Image: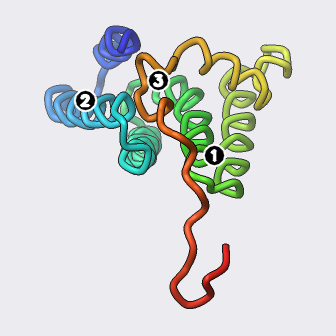
Amino acid sequence: MRILPLLFSLVYCGCGVDKSEWQTEYMQVLERWERAYQGPDAELAYAETLAYAEYLEKMQTEEVTFRADEVLVFVYPRLGLLAEHLGREEDAKRHFDQATLHARLVHPSDPETKSTEEAFRGYLEEMDTPDKTLWRRQPNQPPQTTATSGRF
């Protein structure tokens, strides 16, 4: 992915914490996420994207000098697209709402139109094309049924 060099350069910006430890860990999480997100398995892509978001949030909490909040601006809408693809409409809505709120916190001076669900969909249509993200080529998955209810 073309985002890797950008993220890699961000990792090396002003680090007060033990650089080698968290840089190595971050690169492993990033590589796992990129492989899964680019692959054909939407369930795996969703799980790894969620793990990546949680890791970035942990980095923020631990105040690692890295702009994790900037990266999260596009991780949340990716979770929204994946959830929607998997038929998880409520999760998709929650992730897109989270993306909007997060983007407005990170970029408060940007016009609100840049951080809407529609705007994120447009950005991701350009960035995460089906030739780069194989799970997007697969048909959308129907919602999961439970064994006890037999309903959605």
Q: Is residue 25 left or right of residue 52?
A: left
Quarter of image, res 143? bottom right
| Dot 3 amino acid type | Arg
- The residue labelled by disc 3 is 67
Disc 3 to disc 2: CB gap under 8 Å = no
Q: Nearer the viewer, mark 3 or mark 2?
A: 2
The residue depicted at 55 percent of the width and 67 percent of the height is 144
Q: Which of the colour schemes (rainbow, by chain, secondary structure, one colour) is used?
A: rainbow
**Residue lying farthest to the front in this orientation:** 139
Lower sequence index among marks 3 and 2: 2
Front in this rendered view, residue 131 or 67: 131
Label placed on residue 31: 2
The residue depicted at 32 percent of the width and 19 percent of the height is 11
- The residue labelled by disc 1 is 84
Lower sequence index among marks 1 and 3: 3
Q: Mark 2 packing: few (<14 Cα in 10 Å), some, or many (20+)?
A: some
The residue depicted at 70 percent of the width and 51 percent of the height is 94
Quarter of image, res 18? top left
Q: Nearer the viewer, mark 1 or mark 2?
A: 1
Eyeballing the image, is 131 above or below 88?
A: above
| Dot 2 amino acid type | Glu
Q: Position of residue 79 (x, y in %)?
A: 55, 41
Lower sequence index among marks 1 and 2: 2
Q: Position of residue 87 (x, y in %)?
A: 62, 54
